[in-house]
Image (cartoon, grey):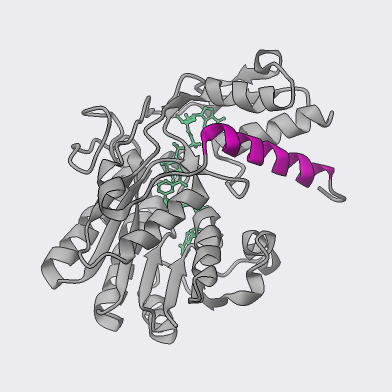
Amino acid sequence: MKRALITGITGQDGAYLAQLLLAKGYTVFGLVRRSSTAEGAALRLRWLGIAEQVTLLDGDLTDLGSLLRVVAEAAPDEIYNLAAQSFVKTSFHQPHLTGEVTALGAGQMLEALRLQAPRARFYQASSSEMFGLVQATPQSETTPFYPRSPYAVSKLYAHWMAVNYRESFGLHINSGILFNHESPLRGLEFVTRKITDGVARIKLGLARELVLGNLEAQRDWGHARDYVRAMWLMLQQDKPQDFVIATGRTASVQDFCALAFGHVGLNWQDHVTTNPAFLRPAEVDVLTGDAAKARRLLGWVPEISLEQMVAEMVEADLARLAAPGG
Ligand code: NDP
Ligand code: GDR
């Protein structure tokens, strides 16, 4: 029976990945940081009904000692480093913290791998945000990077550290350059979930409008369940390497609104307003990924369409808000 350690297990991807690995018969350990509301920490794991099936170990990406202890305790065959300060807007307000967690924290995990579990296979959660001001379209593993936020700069540091540790120490380290992926477990601050939650509130008469920022931004949106499968596939390969994971289809925030409001028979133009408070100092205008390498070497293709995902997210938010205490 294989053993896996997931940092960021309480986040969107961590929860879906834990579910996938449990279904494959893994023993799953998760790194969890201390919080004053401990009961809220496993919210997503409970939503998936797997909270009791994983072992949570306390530690923090910024505390190397805790990572060494956790890796020793989990004795993992596979490590998935998903923990990060992952919200781009916040990274402009807290650039130093973002660097400490998202950049240096990843470096600490690589050290923990090297010192404590050098035979384990390692996944680093890299991001399409590293392409930022895109230098070519679509973006593949060979497209030059141009990060546009402290978050993206931090991810780029982590990505190059992953590559460097692979080349320097011969470790099985893979960097997955994943484009945006969403689900009913997406944090409410991200635009897709903010929209589907807003649609559900408006439909149920709990709100009248939805206030957004840049409606013109375009993203290549996939489903988190499809994307965690790609993470696992990467670690099953004999040769560690980097992969772009994307659908190849780009839609605007406006398009996403049209789909989500349309799902409940509403017209988005009647409800969406904009406020500069939701704009960023520097924006990533448009991203489109080319996942041909993953298709070729991993046999990975996305199975859930944008329309199916939007419908699932809106329905989940309607159900959540209609539930007692929702
Ligand atoms: P989330 O924001 O949902 O989850 C982030 C996780 O990191 C949470 O479990 C959080 O814990 C944990 N975390 C934050 N800071 C620390 C810390 N100092 N020590 C330990 N754990 C910490 O992110 P996603 O699940 O959406 O994304 C997973 C990873 O993939 C992230 O690294 C993200 O940057 C990257 N990524 C995501 C993409 C996407 O579209 N979702 C695309 C490309 C990359 P807590 O619950 O306590 O806050
Ligand atoms: P992103 O996701 O920055 O791409 O990072 P987010 O959903 O926050 O923004 C996507 C685009 O929508 C525009 N936008 C808004 N965004 C938010 N959050 N709120 C709004 O009201 C709003 N209005 C318009 C944004 O300006 C942006 O252009 C996500 C994160 O998961 C990262 O961790 C990950 O690395 C990348 O995806 C790939």
Residue 121 placement (x, y as % from top left): 30, 71
Give the number of marks.
0
Instruction: Indicate whether residue 211 is drawn in magenta.
Output: no
Identity of the residue drawn at 23% across and 69% down: 172
Residue at image coords 33%, 69% = 109
Q: Is residue 199 above or below residue 61?
A: above
Image quadrant of residue 44?
A: bottom right
Magenta stretch, main secondary structure, is helix
Residue 319 inside the magenta-drawn segment? yes
The reply to whether residue 192 is in sight is: yes
Is 155 or 223 nearer to us in this picture?
Answer: 223
Residue reaching furthest to the left = 168
Residue in the picture at 26% in, 81% down: 115
Outermost residue to the right: 324
In front: 73, or 98?
73
Q: Is residue 145 above or below residue 158?
A: above
Percent coordinates x, y for residue 325 in the rendering: 85, 50
Task: Please identify the quadrant where the N terminus is shown.
Answer: bottom left
Q: Position of residue 324 (x, y in %)?
A: 87, 50
Left/right placement of residue 70 relative to residue 305 reads: left
Span of residues in magenta: 305-322
Choose between 269 and 301: the one closer to the eye: 301
Q: In the image, 68: left or right of 222?
A: left
The residue depicted at 70 percent of the width and 31 percent of the height is 198
**Is residue 33 visible from the viewing direction of this image?**
no
Task: Reply above or below: 192 against 38.
Answer: above
